[in-house]
Structures are given as structure tokens and as C-alpha cells.
Image (tube, helix red, strand yellow):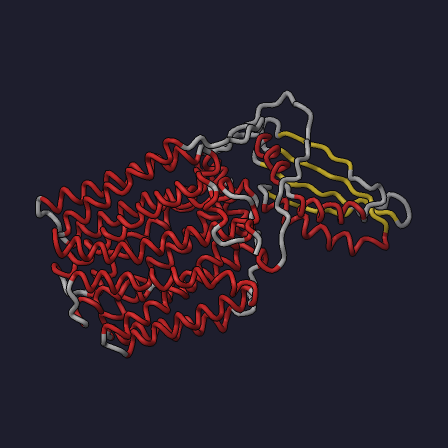
Amino acid sequence: MSDSRSPFAPLRNRLFLVIWVAAMASNVGTWVQSVGEKWVMGGLSHSPLLMSLIETGSTLPMLILSMPGGAIADIVDRRRLLLGTQAWMLLVAAAMALLSALHLVTPTVLITMSLLLGVGAALNAPAWQACLPELVPREQIAAGVALNSVGFNVSRAVGPALGGLVVGLFGPTWAFTLNAVSFVGVLVVLKGWRRTVVPTDLPAERFSAAMKVGLRYTRHSRALQVILLRGGGFVFFGGAAFALLPTLAIHRLGLGSSAFGLLLGCTGTGAVAATFVLPSLRTRLSPNSLLAGAMTIYAAGLLVLAFVVHALPVGMALLICGAGWLSVLSTCNTAVQLSVPSWVRARALGVYITVWGGSMASGAAFWGWVAERWGLHTAFAASAVGMLLLLAATARLRLQALHVPMDLSPHRLEPHSPEAIHPDEGPILTVLEYQVREAQKEAFQLAMQEVRRIRIRDGAVRWSLFLDLSPVEPGLYRFTESFLSSSWGEHLRQHHRATVEDRGYLRQAFELCANSRPRISHMVAAGQERGSFFERIFE
């Protein structure tokens, strides 16, 4: 294996290494706090539902805020956004430590504070993951994603064990304090990062427009939709292990705080172990086969949790679950990074994290309710069966970017000479006239369906293709393509969003024209009323 393809190649980049170590230390603090929260809740209530709602509280903001966080990360300096989110989480953790020291913690306080920490994590995650391609070359992205997963799962292995010791020796207040301190290292590293910003002469993208374009891109990108379906479904069923494990460990196995922390760390240990075999497995198995195998062993681990009530086999099952968890989610995360161009990467990751967080939050609440009504073992068994059914239903959906490399580099076409029009002017109607011979009509209309997908995916509000009923001459027909952009600035951005792969599809359509290139004209709305506030938002 060449040095650039080594799973540890990104660590030779000093900036990636420093950020990676700081993030891992912060994640250790997060898991220490998690042990403290669940241990305190176990002392306050025996309800599996209340225990699982801590997991819901920490992941629910992912459902609501990850997409806005991705849009913000695509239009502002990501470094500054990360500084803000890390500072927010430091303050929330410090407040939790203070409330604990004053003996003011209740189940409501625990769930609320986990929710506030989740807000910071939801806004932080898309920007954090979108920075990876800025730190490592393209051929090392998969290794970088895997190393980020390694760091997270080393934290998951070490953090709960350390959390159990801290809670057992010093009490939960110190666990919350340690988490607050852990954010300091990340803030110092980010403060010293001199991020290179690519200059552009395009007008700044507005938040509402960025959100709409991100959602439109997701709607028209099948490759991204497959990743969301497979990853989100896995998390919904697999999240039962994390939501119900504290109840199983504390109230069924009767473990103390140290043993509880060690048991929670088993999933992280299994994930770290999987990291060392994943590169070899990826050379032997297709991504589809790797996903199928990982989901199967995870379901097997859930079945062990359903029917075994001894700590040692439960720990072994969690090692298996950890390996399966890392294999599935690192594969899906890499697929997202390689399936979308840079201009929409943070938004696509925001959508992915939204689906992940929504699946985790809803799954935690659902499996907690199932356990409360029918028992823990029924909940674990049902989640295992559900995962196997999901695997059977989605086995043929392939992660495209991992099967066929996609050229998502920008086309760098200079679309227009400077125009005396303000970027906010609009909407803009772009009209292209094609002349097509009768023998090419059917092929041209088929090619234009891919053009339609590209136009709408990259920001067009509406798209149409018309055929002139009067031929230009016998055997020669005129087609008119039109698409609407919300403003001149948005139209300019659409040109810069075209990738090399997109231009290939456009070229196929152009080659079917008798006049080689269509005649293009641009029109701006004249005298149009602006409409109400809500009409402008949802136009």
C-alpha cells in the first residue's frame, strides 16, 4: 500500500493531526459527561423512557438544526462558526456543572441540558465534517473520515471508562466540569488555524436561498438520497443499543459506575478494532457487501442483548455492535463527501446529519417506549429483526460514488461578461433555442431530461422544454428550453456550480443539435410586484 493510500496518511499533515487530537480530547469529555448524565438519571428514576429521552435530547437538535447549520457553513467562514459552536458547548457544560454542584439537577434539567448541548453539536457537525477536504487531498478523504471515526470511537472507548471512574470517585459534578474543560483545547487549535479562503467575485449567498438550494439539490440527487435512506434506516434500528443500554446495565445487570462506564466503552473499542481491518475489507468487498455484512453483525449483537443477561457476553455483543456501527457510518459519510461538489458539501452533510439525528432521536424515544411497554428484551429483539428487514429491502440500492468515481471538480466556465445589473435583481429567465433534426428528436428529448435534473438541482426554480409546432424547414425542428432563477446573483452561482461531469451531460444534448450550440438569451422581470413576505420566502 502506497504512503498516500495508507489509513494513517492524513496524520502526516500537521494541521489535521492537531485538530484530530483536540477533537478526540473533546469527545472524551463528551462521553464523560454522558456517563454522568445517565448515572444521575438512573438515581432519579427507573423509567427506561426517561433514560432514553437523554439520548433523544442530545440528538433531536440534529433533526432541526443540522440543515440550517450546513447552509450557514457554506456561506460564512467555517472556522468562525466552529469557534462559536465550541464556545456555546463549553458554556452549557459549565452551567451543568454549576447546577450539579448546587444540587439543582432533576430529570427535566438533565434532558434540557442535553438538548442545549445538542444544539451546539448540530450547528458544529456540518462545518466540522465539511472542513475535511480542506485538510487532506481527495485520495485521502476516505482515510480522513475513517480516522475521524477512530478518534470518535477511541473517545467512546476511553471516555465512558474514565467517566465511570470520575463519577465513582468524585461524583457527577466533576464529570460535567471535565467536559467543559475539554472544549478549551479545540478552541485554542481553531484560533490558531489560518484557513485559506478561496476568493470569488460572486455576490454573497443569502441564508434562505442557500437553504432552498440545498434542499432542492437533495431532492434531485439520487446518489445522496440512497445514502440518506440506508444510513438513516440503520441508525433508527441500531440506536436501540445506545438508548436502552444504560437501563440494561444499571437496573438489569446491577453494575456500579465503573463497570457501567467500561460497558459503555465496549462499543468504542469494537469500532476502533474495526478501523484496522476496514482498509483490507474495502479492497476485497464492494461497498454494498461491506454494508450488508456490517448490518448483519450489528443485528446479531442486538439479538445477544435481547436474550443474554450476563455482563461478559453483553460486553462481547457491544464490541460487535461497535464494529458494525463504525463500518456502516464511515462508509456512508465517505459516500456523502465523494457524492457532492464543494459548493453544497456542508449543506449535504447537514441533510445527512439531520437524517442521522432524526433517526437517532425518534429511534431512542420509540425503543424506550417499546421497552417501557413490553420489556427491554422485546425492544432489542424487535430492533434486530427490523434491521434485517431493512437490509433486505435496500440491498440493491448502491452507493454510487463508491462504485463509480464521479468528477465533481468545478467546470470553471466564465459564463458572462460584467453586466450592469444588481445581483438581487430578478427573477431571471434564461431561454435557449435548439435546432434538432427529426432523426435526433427522441434522443434529444431524452438527453434533456438529465439537463433538467442538473438545472433544478443546481438552483433553477422552474424548468420547461417546448417544441415549436412549425418546423424551421422540412425535417428541422426548434426546441426552446427555459429555466427561472430567483435573482441574477443566483443565476451566476448556477454557472459556477456546474461540474466537469455535468458539462458532459450538457455536451451530449448540444451534440444532437444541428446548430451545435443553442442561442441563449437572458431576461429580467420588469415591473413585477414583490409580493408578501411569505410569498417571497416560498416562491
Q: Residue at x 23, y 76 (%)?
A: 309
Q: Residue furthest right?
A: 474
Q: Residue 302, how many percent across, how many down?
A: 34, 72
Q: Is residue 75 above or below residue 96?
A: above
Quarter holding the N terminus is bottom right
Asked whether the viewer can see residue 408, the reply is yes
Report the side of 392 relative to 474 (left or right): left
Q: Is residue 299 above or below residue 531?
A: below
Viewer-closest of 310 and 532: 310
Q: Quadrant of residue 253?
A: bottom left
Q: Is residue 187 above or below residue 47?
A: above
Report the side of 219 relative to 304 (left or right): right
Q: Residue 334, how many percent across, how many down?
A: 50, 54
Asked whether the viewer can see residue 535, the reply is no
Q: Residue 365, how many percent across, how many down?
A: 29, 62
Viewer-closest of 97 and 527: 97
Q: Is residue 317 above or below residue 40?
A: below
Viewer-closest of 469 and 269: 269
Q: Residue at x 42, y 33 (%)?
A: 193
Q: Residue 213, how many percent across, how many down?
A: 52, 42
Report the side of 384 relative to 183 (left or right): right
Q: Residue furthest left?
A: 103
Q: Residue furthest top?
A: 420
Disc tally is: 0
Q: Quadrant of residue 419?
A: top right
Q: Residue at x 45, y 50 (%)?
A: 351
Q: Residue at x 41, y 72 (%)?
A: 297
